[in-house]
Amino acid sequence: MGISIVFGGASYEHEISIVSTIALKKTFGTYIKHYIFLDGDHRFWLIPHEYMKSSFFAQGLYKTKAKELFLGNGGFYYPQGLFNKPKILKIAVLYSLIHGADGEDGTLSAICEFFAIPYIAPRVQACVLSFDKSLTKLFAAQRGVLTLESQILTQQDTPPLTIPYPVIIKPARLGSSIGVSVVTQESQLRYGLDSAFEYDTRVLVEPFIENVKEYNLAGCKIGEEWVFSIVEEPSKKQFLNFEDKYLDFSRTQQVLRADISPTLEQELQENFKKIYTDAFEGALIRCDFFVIQDRVYLNEINPIPGSGAHYLFADFLGTLQALSANLPHSKRIKPSYKYIEQIQRAKGK
């Protein structure tokens, strides 16, 4: 059947999306039927397989060497023939690798719902809950999942911190460790806030716990069956910044499997289920957890993880194929106009 990948987007994580897609190209090969690039001007382009290289996008070559696509009912269209008659691009399922805005914020999901395009990604409501870290904490609390205490600051309102140092400061609606700082004393606070406010008008402040145990778990629900990845224990530094996560990863792709007990692995999976159930169906997500004094805390939800988190699965291709065949379907409502007819008849009387 194959899948079509959509990537790019007008966001600070645009380049990360390109890196993710190129990584999957090496893994999937010809199983990927189409590469659909969303540029910074919100134009879609069909990228030939042979041009899937980072330099192709950095140099803007897609504008002359790729075919522009246009959205319509049921999918993407492109003009063909002497009279530019639109022809539909045959897509079995669209897999979103758009990180950050345009993807994880729910924009693409809404577009797919509107045009009745089958897709692998969180639905709109799930995107809203996972894109904003402050909403994620409220959602987790409602699901009975622990999170660290936090404080939200805005550019217009920056009251004194209620959390003792050291703290970690993050843009509230951004991932990939962009704009993240660890602040150990008050003299560093202004710089840390300015770094985060460069990317978002809202920032999240949490306690920074040195040498905390951190575990990542990806997965999805397919029908009634849960599919989980291995539990990854990220290599520990003070925290993983952008370069640690993406530049080093692209060179080595080494994954550390966590040396944990079956009991803890099951506890991580149970917390994952609480987050995923009746919210993230149709998506493959990754949850990042802390373990503090034998208690599991949700750090954050990665609704569209880097490279799809394929490196955590023994059979990622099989998982994606099964998920593609078990996507949720929205009910299409057809207007009946019966109430208008009733009103017109009533007026006629």
Image (spheres, grey):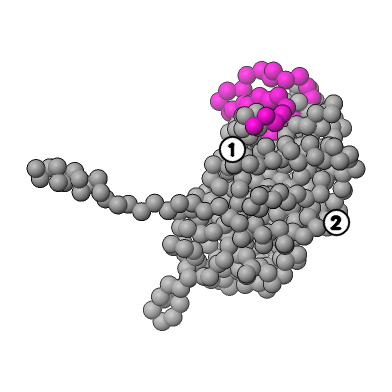
Residue 146 on the magenta span:
yes
Give the image quarter of residue 169: top right
Q: Residue at x 72, y 36 (%)?
A: 271
Front-most of 129 and 10?
A: 129
Dot 1 falls on a residue whose secondary structure is: helix
Residues under numbered marks 1 and 2 in contact, where contact means CB atoms less than 8 Å apart: no
Label number found at residue 285: none
Which residue ends up furthest to the left in the rendered image? 349
Label number found at residue 252: 2
Name the residue carrying label 1. 129
- Secondary structure mostly seen in magenta is loop
- Mark 1 residue type: Leu
Could you say where residue 288 lies in the image, as x and y percent from the top left? Answer: 75, 40
> What span is colored magenta in the figure?
143-172
Residue 99 on the magenta span:
no
Callout in the foreground (1, 2): 1
- Disc 1 crowd, CA 10 A, few/some/many (<14, 14-19, 20+): many
